Amino acid sequence: MHEYGYQILEALVTEMMPDAKMKASLNEINASKRLKEAASHKAEADKIRQVKEAEADAEARYLSGLGVARQRRAIVQGLQESVTVFSEEVDGATPKDVMDILLLSQYFDTLSVVGANNLILEHDPATVADLQAQVGNSFLRSK
């Protein structure tokens, strides 16, 4: 334009129209960048979630342990009080006698709890044969 006496000092470009293939390529590059960022953020969120779950599990186990320890401490204190009271109120009773009685009562309590939901059988060939005969007879009677 200089030949015609004009000089271009500035040009204002208002709308660029690149080729359609170029547009598609740029859009694909931007989309892949966004997908990469999204995958990175998702992985980081999963990592944080796993860490927080592990921390919560550790805290729950710790608190459960404290609860069990307090429960056992209360049981021991109750047993100590029982031994002391029984020894004082029963003439000639020693703490060993009281402990034997307590162990026996705990044994019976355990048997009643286990026996409420379970069937305990002897592991003896004669017992198994007897049980087999009883089951067989009950089937024959039911017909």
Image: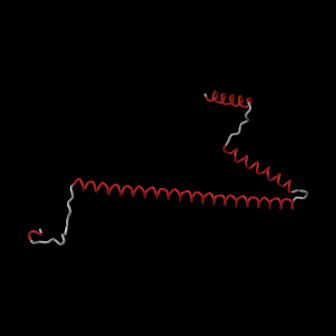
Q: Is residue 55 above or below residue 134?
A: below
Q: Quadrant of residue 39?
A: bottom left
Judged from this view, the residue extending furthest toward the left is 4
Residue at the front extreme? Answer: 3
Residue drawn at the location 46% of the way across and 58% of the way down: 44
Closest to the observer, 140 or 117 = 117
**Residue at screen point 58% across, 57% down:** 57
Image location (x, y in percent) of residue 88: 87, 62
Would you say 31 lies left or right of 65 here? left
Q: Quadrant of the N terminus?
A: bottom left
Residue 56: horizontal and vertical position, in percent?
Answer: 56, 59
Q: Is residue 143 above or below residue 69?
A: above
Picture coordinates of residue 113, whole percent (x, y): 70, 48
Q: Nearer the viewer, residue 30 or 72?
A: 30
Q: Residue at x 82, y 59 (%)?
A: 83
In the displayed structure, 10 sits above or below 112; it is below
32 vs 93, nearest the viewer: 32
- Point out residue 29 in the picture as x, y percentages from the top left corner: 31, 55
Residue lying at the far right of the rendered structure = 92
Q: 90 or 11, which lies in front? A: 11
Judged left or right of residue 33, residue 112 is right
- What residue is drawn where x is 43% and y is 56%? 42
Task: Judge left or right: residue 28 versus residue 10.
Answer: right
Q: Which quarter of the rendering shows the C terminus?
A: top right
Quadrant housing residue 25: bottom left
Count the numbered circles shown: 0
Q: How is the image coloured?
A: secondary structure
